[in-house]
Image (tube, grey):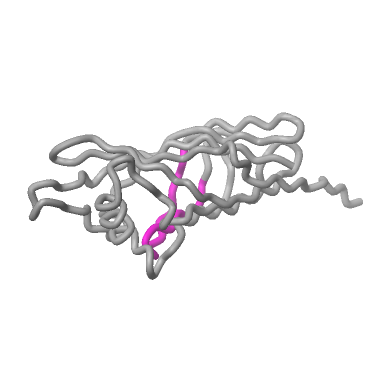
Amino acid sequence: MFVGFSQDTFILSADSKLTIDGTSTVHDWTVTANTMEGVVMAEGNAPKQIDFNVVVADIKSERGATMNKKMHAALGKDTSPKVIFDLKEVKNLATLLGTLTIAGNSQEVEIKCQIDVSGDSISIVGEHGIALKNYSIEPPTAMFGQVIVGDDVTVKFNLIFKK
């Protein structure tokens, strides 16, 4: 006898937030992802499939156009317009295993998070450190090399998916 679970589809809500924090030789910085797309397929209380991406052109800095332009170039906006996460497995509703693609380069990642499923919504909250060199990204520089972005950044996310 075959017993099936119904799959529910959840769509990323506009209430979701994703920021990237980093450092440079001059100041710490934060940029915000303003355009994200995502779908979660869930069975019972566990996500089974997550398709999530961030539009590179809409990642913006509070420091203005010059930083945006350098960041977009470093992230390969023209050839890889999206940062993409594809879920492979969820462990203990606390770890996402999947493939993260940035600037056209993919890495298998293990992202610690907190997943809450309640009725018609799923929230996924956490943070994940990324070394730019692992994605063949040259840290941006400014002022003739006087300002250099640090290789390590932290992605902080509060993603809310609704039925």
Q: Which residue lies furthest to the front in this view?
A: 65
Does residue 29 lie above or below 141 as drawn?
A: above
Does residue 83 lie above or below 19 as drawn?
A: below
Q: Position of residue 30 (x, y in %)?
A: 33, 38
Q: In which quarter of the image is the C terminus?
A: top right
Give whichever of 118, 109 is nearer the camera.
118
Relative horizontal placement of residue 43, taking residue 92 as reference (left or right): right
Q: Position of residue 68 (x, y in %)?
A: 31, 52
Residue 92 in sight in this render = no
Say how many tags the image has: 0
Which stretch appears magenta? Answer: 97-111
- Occupied quadrant, residue 136: bottom left
**Residue located 27% across and 43% down the image:** 152
Q: Where is residue 145 in the image (x, y as percent from the top left)?
A: 9, 53
Q: Where is residue 11 in the image (x, y as percent from the top left)?
A: 67, 47
Q: Is residue 98 magenta?
A: yes
Residue 18 in sight in this render = yes
Q: Is the magenta stretch mostly helix, strand or loop?
A: strand
**Residue located 47% across and 36% down the image:** 112
Q: Does the magenta stretch include residue 43?
A: no
Does residue 87 lie above or below 27 as drawn?
A: below
Relative horizontal placement of residue 108, taking residue 27 as reference (left or right): right
Give whichever of 10, 78 is nearer the camera.
78
**Residue located 59% across and 33% down the image:** 115
**Residue located 43% across and 58% down the image:** 101
